[in-house]
Image (cartoon, rainbow, N blue to C red):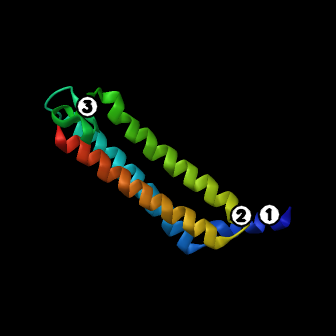
Amino acid sequence: MAEKISEQKKYFHDHFVLLLLSLNAFLAVAGSIATILRMSTSHGTGYIVQYRANLGVNAFKTGVALDIVSFVVFFAVVLVANAVLSYRVYTISRELTITILSLGLLLLSLAIIVSNSLLALR
């Protein structure tokens, strides 16, 4: 029991892990806010949610606002999943925890890029 508490304490005292967690949280919140703000300044109700290169003229598929709001839900799910998974894996390997959090940063960055690209096209 005391060993488990010390491992939990080590996780929350590891500066690099906390830095990565903070960056993940910042990107998730910033991506959510940016997506919501870009939606509120819309010029219509149709949002481009898909691009299909093989369709030619009809390559862009439109959707409703709920399709774009799913990005906000995705940001939250990625943040929570990364935090929980890295916390549970820390007792096995610190390097694996850092890898999980780093991949979460990459995933959140790509999600921000995709959501902003889709909102810029409409």
Q: Amino acid at mark 2?
A: Gln
Which residue in the protein does label 1 denote? 4
Does the CB distance between marks 2 and 1 fall below 8 Å? yes
Q: Is residue 32 left or right of residue 59?
A: right
Does the CB distance between marks 2 and 3 fall below 8 Å? no
Which quarter of the image is occupied by the C terminus? top left
Which residue in the protein does label 2 denote? 8
In this view, the residue in front, 118 or 66, is 118
Q: Residue furthest right?
A: 1
Q: Give the vertical position of 97 relative to 73 (above or below).
A: below
SS assignment at label 1:
helix
Mark 2 or mark 3, earlier in chain: 2
Question: Crowding at label 1, few (<14), some or many (≥20) Cα neighbours within 10 Å?
Answer: few
In this view, the residue in front, 62 or 10, is 62
Which residue in the protein does label 3 denote? 61
> Based on the displayed image, in which of its 4 quarters is residue 115 positioned?
top left
Q: Nearer the viewer, mark 3 or mark 1?
A: 3
SS assignment at label 2:
helix
